[in-house]
Amino acid sequence: MNIREFIEHRQDCPICNSKLTSYLKTGSSKRGAIKIENNIALATFEMRDMYSRDLHPTTYKVIYNLSLDNNSFTIDFTNESPKDSVSINTIKKFNYYSENISNIYCLTKDCSICNKYSARTSYFNLDYKKATVNDFFIWQENFALITKMETDYRVAFLQNYYSAPESEYQRVYQNNESVILTWRSYDGGASFAYNYPEIKKTYTKLPLIPFVSELITSTRINTLILFS
């Protein structure tokens, strides 16, 4: 798939209908929010001069310019002094920066309003010789579904896994598989960054459960839980 296809996949949160934000995420878990300009996805990161002896080393901004349609890319550098040009030494520092994050990236998106939806692609590399983004696809979507019970809430965290990546560290889940984490809560709190209650939660693997709507999918999951 290309960058545009990922960004246009669910532009609104399926839980609260708020606009979703897409990110480029590095292997070191740093994220740069994606901004679209002239069919280019721009993601900005900071790269500090870790070897400088100055008390206030120069902070360069690394700007990834990713084509929405053909997965080509370029990289720009800026720093706090616009008059300075980018030196060969800066390029060498970027090479170290790239090695430090293992040249591993993925695209993510989430809802910052309700925090009940997130998605991410498989990991990919940047081919610097060809100036292209290697192949990737949507790997995972997460949905937090809350059902009001008589005295508390039932929280169901639906994790949908699609085409399984070849990488060893991503082979835990199979193609088209759903994982459901459920627990009871008195406040109904849940989010894609939630620390699940290890003791009280249940864990179920099932064939893929497509997300249709919050109500329909919650009803289906609650039925599965009832008869499991």
Image (tube, rainbow, N blue to C red):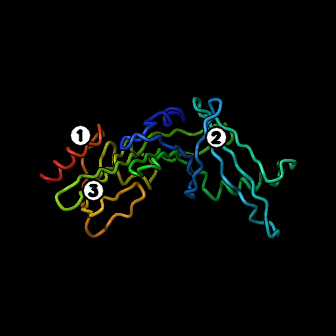
- Vertically, is 58 above or below 37? below
Name the N-terminal-most of marks 2 and 3. Answer: 2
Query: Is 123 positioned to the left or the right of 14 in the image?
Result: right
| Disc sitting over residue 138 in the figure | none
Seen at 57% across and 58% down, the residue is 28
Residue found at x 86% / y 50%: 84
Q: Is residue 144 above or below residue 131?
A: below
Question: What is the crowding at mark 1: few (fewer than 14 residues within 10 Å), some, or many (at least 20)?
Answer: few
In the image, which is nearer the foreground, mark 2 or mark 1? 1
Instruction: Please name the amino acid that badge 1 sits on.
Output: Ile
- Residue at the disc numbered 2: 42
- Please name the residue that numbered disc 3 is placed on: 155
**Label 1 secondary element:** helix
Q: Position of 162 compared to 40: left or right?
A: left
Label 3, residues with CA under 10 Å away: few <14, some 14-19, many ≥20: many
Position of 80 with respect to 124 (left or right) is: right
Q: Position of residue 59 (x, y in %)?
A: 75, 58
Residue 42: image location, x then y, percent: 64, 40
Q: How crowded is mark 2: few (under 14 residues within 10 Å), some or many (20 or more)?
A: many
Question: What is the x, y in percent for residue 146?
Answer: 28, 52
Which residue is labeled 1 in the image?
216
Residue 127 sits in quarter: top right
Mark 2 vs mark 3: in front: 3
Q: Name the kind of residue labelled 3 in the image.
A: Val
